Image (cartoon, rainbow, N blue to C red):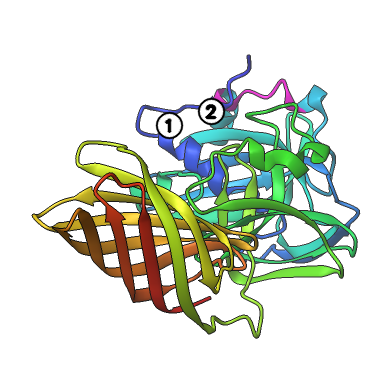
Amino acid sequence: MRNRIGRATARSASVAVVAIATATLALTITGGASAKVRGISGIHDARYCEILELRGTPPKAKIVVWNTLGLNDCPPRKWDPLDASELATELGATLVVLNGPRHFLMDAASGRTGRVESFHGLRMRRVAAIPISSPAELVRAAYTERTISRTNVWRWKRGRKVFELLAPDGANYLMQSYSQELDPSLTIRRLKRLGKRLDLPKGWRYRARTLRRGLTLKARGEATIIQDDLQNTYQRLPRRKGTGRESHRVDLEGITRTTGAPGPGMLEDQGTVTGRPFGPGTVDIIVTFGAPGSVTGTFEIDATKGSAFGTLRMDYTIAAGEIEFTGTASFTGGTGKYRGIRGKDLAATDRNTLDGQNGRLTLKGRARY
């Protein structure tokens, strides 16, 4: 198997990881005398590869990205024989990473690019220079935002199927490219059901949707990107005008029962809820008993149009064969219609028999989403 990461020491191995995360920047160079604005179309599902060249060490380091898009489709006969260690030596680089093959998902793109070079017969264009000023920038983590310098305009046609990650804070991320490095069998046809394979953080969702009208995504100097755990890359969409959070009344009632103890000093209640603004749904509450007479915990409400989750802090008293919890709850995130939901210090109560099988809860206040 060819060497994909060349001249990597134990410390610089992390550089290779972050380089993969911050690459996929075709048509995005940030400037330079030789940079020109170029446009290209017909690139939906276009295969491409990148060479990532690390020069120097932090705080005076940079990653130079070379990309095949618009020049060739990264033919295996030229890509597969490349050796990262040999390239690093030839280029005088600290480290070289071979990133690909990958596939773009937009239909057309334009942006600033640089000169063309040949790497053992494989023509590539310089498309990005990423400054690396601290070792912290060399740490890659899936589902973690990175802000990068770039200028580009990407376009998707009406009727095109697109793939998104929806974060609980309301952010939407549009997939710009998919990777075949970790899964060579991944194809565009398999992206529709990719969500079942991803190890999504709590509250995140993956969705596929068909565009009712054309979509243009611009980056004017910088863009925010993330990767999933299969190294597919997404760019954050700007929040649409008129979609600011609005205040909504919360007035919920529910019936719960204790279903188990997830850990020492913990209880889990599950049940059903109804009321504003979720309508009928289910609820899952996990509390931890702390100081005498108090608990802290989390809750999640699942409804037809999405979910909402948050934290709670309550005191409790025991009398006449019942335990009564009173306190406050806060919404910290959601999905679907309720993505980005926020609300603090809502009044929360939960009264139950001591066997935990007859809970009655209420939640009242206001939330914004």
Q: At which x and y percent is residue 90?
A: 58, 30
Residue wearing tag 2:
5
Q: At which x and y percent is residue 310?
A: 39, 61
Who's the residue at 39% across and 27% down the image? 9
Is residue 155 left or right of 356 when viewed as pictured? right
Numbered disc 2: secondary structure: strand
- In the depicted structure, whether residue 194 falls above or below residue 270: above
Q: Per the image, is 81 magenta?
A: yes
Numbered disc 1: secondary structure: helix
Who's the residue at 49% across and 34% down the image? 95
Residue type pointed to by label 2: Ile
Is residue 105 left or right of 356 when viewed as pictured? right
Residue sitting at the far left: 292
Depth order, front residue of 11/251: 251
The number of callouts visible is 2
Is residue 102 left or right of 258 when viewed as pictured? right
Residue wearing tag 1:
13
Pick whichever of labels 1 and 2 is earlier in the sequence: 2
* Part of the protein shown in magenta: 79-85
Q: Determine if residue 240 is in view.
A: yes
Who's the residue at 46% across and 70% down the image? 252
Which numbered circle lies on residue 225?
Answer: none
Who's the residue at 60% across and 52% down the image? 205
Depth order, front residue of 226/328: 328
